[in-house]
Amino acid sequence: QMQLVESGGGLVQPGGSLRLSCAASGSIFRIKAIGWYRQAPGKERELVAHITSGGMSNYTDSVKGRFAISRDNANNTMYLQMNNLKPEDTAVYYCNADLVSSSLEIFGLWGQGTQVTVSS
């Protein structure tokens, strides 16, 4: 059974940094596209950053220049580096990935979510 497990959230002051990690485990053949989403209270879940299997990334406008998505294919781990955090970045962050299993089936999985709170 494949799964995604996130870590790295927490409380940080405005202007601070956090790095979120998302580790994939199970019988994984490879990981295709990866996305980081967030959901603030009372708001819909939104895509924050996305990276293809080839390494092409894109970001929602509000985080461009501050966040960076990356992947370590050798260790089946994905990251979201968040710099110059703002109170409006406060949300639960989720990773999402299309995983190809050892039997070559494709599964779209979500992590459990990690809380990021930006406050002084």
Image (cartoon, helix red, strand yellow):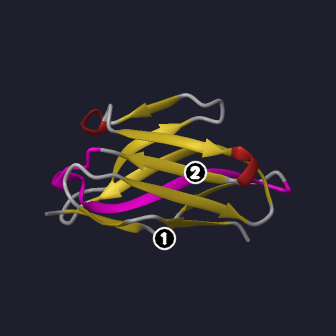
Q: Furthest-right residue in view?
A: 103
Residue at 70% over, 66% down:
2
- Determine the residue positioned at 38% across, 46% down: 47
Check the image and report above or below for 102 versus 2.
Answer: above
The residue type indicated by label 1 comes to Gln
Report the residue marked by disc 1.
Answer: 112
Where is residue 84 drawn, in percent x and y?
26, 44
| Residue 119 image position (x, y, % from top left) | 16, 63
Residue position marked by numbered label 2 in the rendering: 78
Residue 26 image position (x, y, % from top left): 75, 66
Residue closest to the far left: 120
Residue at coordinates 26% horizontally, 56% vertically from top-left?
Answer: 44
Q: Which residue is nearer to you in this view: 82 or 88?
A: 82
Residue 86 position, x and y percent, is 20, 50
Q: Which callout, 1 or 2, points at the residue further toward the start of the chain?
A: 2
Which class describes the residues within 10 Å of circle 1: few (<14), some (14-19), or many (20+)? some
Circle 2 SS class: strand
Q: On the rendered image, what quadrant is the N terminus found in?
A: bottom right
On screen, residue 111 versus residue 2, left or right, reads left
Q: Residue at x 27, y 33 (%)?
A: 61
Total tally of numbered discs in the picture: 2
Pick the front one: 44 or 71: 71
Figure quadrant of the C terminus: bottom left
Query: Could you tell me which secondary element the residue under label 1 belongs to?
Result: loop
Quarter location, residue 114: bottom left
How far apart marks 1 and 2 lie (CA) works out to 14 Å
**Vertical comparison of 50 with 114: above or below:** above
Judged by depth in the image, the label closer to the viewer, 1 or 2, is 2
Q: Amino acid at mark 2?
A: Met
- Magenta includes 20? no
Tell me which segment is drawn in magenta: 84-103
